[in-house]
Amino acid sequence: MSSQVFRISSESISEANARALADVEREYAALSESLERRGTLRSIGHDIDSLTDAAMQFTVAVPSWGVGTGGTRFGRFPGPGEPTNVFEKLADVATIHQLSGGAPDVSLHIPWDQTDDPNELKQFANNLGLGFDAMNSNTFQDQPGQALSYKYGSLCHTDAAVRSQAIDHNLEVIDYGKRIGSDALTIWIGDGGNFPGQIHLRRAYDHVFDSLSTIYKGLPASWRLFTEHKPYEPAFYSTVVQDWGTSLLLCQTLGPQAFPLVDLGHHLPNTNVELIVARLITAGRLGGFHLNDSKYGDDDLTAGSIHPYQLFLIFNELVDAQLDESVDKGTHKPAYMIDQSHNIKDPIEALIATVDETRKAYIQALIVDRGALHKAQECNDALAAELILKDAYDTDVRPILRMARHRQGAAIEPIAIYRGSGYRQAKAKERRADVNFGGGIV
Ligand code: PSV
Ligand code: MN
């Protein structure tokens, strides 16, 4: 375990917050007054402080692989002081949480983050105030010393021995996750074909289903299995779990502990993602999210950087379901995880911004005048309905987010504090510079 010496001091955060507080209080009071005057607070039955409480309670999990500099297939440009092992990744996540107040959990990827002693890792995380969200298995890459290759697939492979190796890996990930306090396994497989005819489309699905059934049997009763779909990459002709329909079919056949996971970037251009979210809620099977954004075929850009309105519309569906008594809250408890890879931005900054962006979309969805929206929908008044949504979306809720961070003891201006803290420079001295380390997705 590496010793991480430098931490941003809580005094420096509270001193900076004290300097910013008068301005924050002024803008917070102005927003409260404006929401009051517009009738928003009355219509949603909240005061501004309860919105702030909601922001404080909303958290997302950070992917361990997101704190390293990522890359493209053309190359990777590592930044100074990036983490070189899972302990250092956790230290970075703790910093993201310290500053943003909204990232207390980590999602690990095995074997990238595997250690010999899960108890030591759990203890290390606990000391940093962190917990663990869903575990991720990896059968989309070959690992050093691995007996059989995944070149032609893993859970779908034509060779039963390869399938069984991939199944065993997932069972080991469950075992590791149990020891560190996780309660979910996310399975994304790269399995599929690059050319028509390469794989038997139905048989490949059957193999995946059979393999998942065996993994499902190894799930502890309190765990959930998330199946993640993706239309293409690395298989460019036919992915086996290509869309939410296949993911839902798998989960419904597997059993009540299986739920489709929606990675926001895993859709063909112009797909209506909020509609998929609504359908999965109707089916009682929305597992959760991998938050990111995408312009063309990427799945790694910062959430809300390209399609902020889509992010808001997704949260609009989630809040609507949360308030709807007919939605079974026993199954509707989406997991919020980030899945981004940062090759241009400093990963810590990008992840702090993502926490903020996600909270923003959530609070904007909370201030939708839902009664008026439902009425407009019932009367088929498309214009009124759209304006109601836009009214919430156009509201600058950042004073609520700043106040939430202040009340949590996080940073009112997290990026400014981070930049002024010398964190990267300190980590560059502490950490072994290793340009070959696969800290991000390459
Ligand atoms: C695949 O593109 C994916 O979205 C899956 O969630 C993986 O686990 C993750 O990215 C990291 O490669
Ligand atoms: Mn993902």
Image: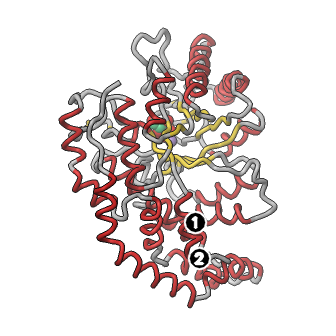
> Which residue reaches farthest right?
326
Which color scheme did the rendering employ for the protein? secondary structure
Q: Residue at x 62, y 14 (%)?
A: 164
Question: In front here: 248 or 221?
Answer: 221
Report helix, strand or loop for mark 2: helix
Residue 202: image quadrant is: top right
Q: Is residue 233 visible?
A: no
Quadrant containing the N terminus in the rendered view? top left
Residue 265, given in percent of the width and then of the height, sits at: 49, 49
Residue that mark 2 sits on: 389
Question: In front here: 391 or 159?
Answer: 391
Label 1 and label 2: CA atoms lie apart by 8 Å
Q: Is residue 414 visible?
A: yes
Residue 304: image quadrant is: bottom left
| In the displayed structure image, the side of residue 302 where residue 381 appears, left or right | right
Residue 391, given in percent of the width and then of the height, sits at: 55, 81
Q: Residue at x 22, y 28 (%)?
A: 432
Residue that mark 1 sits on: 313
Is mark 1 in CB contact (under 8 Å) with mark 2? yes
- Whichever of labels 1 and 2 marks the residue nearer the N terminus, that label is 1
